[in-house]
Amino acid sequence: MDGDLRSLIDMAEAAHDERMIKGALKTFANACGFERFAYLQTEGLEIRTFNSYPEEWQGVYLESQYSRIDPVVTEAKRRMEMFSWTADDWPARGTSELRRFRDQAIDHGIRSGVTIPVEGSFGSTMMLTFASSAQTADVSKLQDAQKAIRAVLAIHYRLKIIAAATIVAPKRLLSPREAMCLMWAAKGKSAPETAMLTGINPRTVQHYLDKAREKLEAATVAQLVAIAKDHGLV
């Protein structure tokens, strides 16, 4: 799991659009046995979210302003450390509105999970949640709290950079794995060296680089890196 967290951090820093970050988070969540992820930033009553929850649930959550009573958000702000949770604990702690929130969350496949909160600037809080429809989530694979915090920060700052960056033409978009291998190539690493650093098979690393060359119309890896730098991808 240490390698998976490292890979998530690398892919987040290599991402040049939100789609790539979503892909990296989805890959990590699935590797840990979770079905959904949610990045949430709160500042006062204002919230910004980036998640893979069902669109219907996203609409209900925002329209009902559930961030006010969401036990995960409340606990994250109070504890400011990684913790696991289960919706089965919520009804006994609140009002009928909270019980309705709990029932709706379960109906949309959000019943348990783990959340990593990080204190941001100007009174804001960032948190990354991995959720499961199971009654109790298996959090045994997510134990490195320091690396988990680094992952949240990497995603937070990459999202800010992406928001200010020029959008690349769709045909030139790279997958999270292609971008990660490109980042290592830009640092002078060969395919075998990248394989050792990422845990990916060397031939698979070469495949990702070849696909990236095809998308950016580069004849060599050196040209690939140069084009990527020109377009602000690395």
Image (cartoon, rainbow, N blue to C red):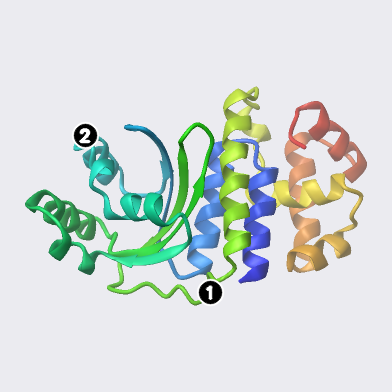
Q: Quadrant of residue 49?
A: top left
Depth check, front residue: 124 or 156: 124
Q: Identify the disc placed on residue 63.
A: 2
For residue 215, say whether it is visible. Answer: yes
| Residue 222 at x, y percent in the picture | 92, 41
Q: Is residue 150 above or below residue 217?
A: below
| Residue 151 at x, y percent in the picture | 60, 53
The kind of residue tagged 1 is Lys
Q: Residue at x 52, y 40 (%)?
A: 120
Q: Secondary structure at mark 1?
A: loop
Task: Assess disc 2: are there few (<14), some (14-19) or many (≥20) residues with their C-alpha within 10 Å of its C-alpha.
Answer: few
The kind of residue tagged 2 is Glu
Q: Where is the C terminus found, in terms of image quarters?
A: top right
| Residue 227 at x, y percent in the picture | 83, 31
Measured Cα–Cα span from mark 1 to mark 2: 34 Å
- Quickly name the residue at label 1: 141
Task: Assess disc 1: are there few (<14), some (14-19) or many (≥20) residues with their C-alpha within 10 Å of its C-alpha.
Answer: few
Contact, mark 1 vs mark 2 (Cβ under 8 Å): no
Q: Secondary structure at mark 2?
A: helix
Q: Where is the N terminus found, in terms of image quarters?
A: bottom right
Q: Is residue 97 above or below residue 157?
A: below
Depth check, front residue: 149 or 218: 149
Q: Left or right of 160: which side holds 69?
A: left
For residue 175, say whether it is visible. Answer: no
Q: Residue at x 79, y 64 (%)?
A: 197
| Residue 55 at x, y percent in the picture | 30, 42
Q: Left or right of 207: which side holds 223?
A: right
Q: Residue at x 32, y 74 (%)?
A: 136
Q: Earlier in the sequence, mark 1 or mark 2?
A: 2
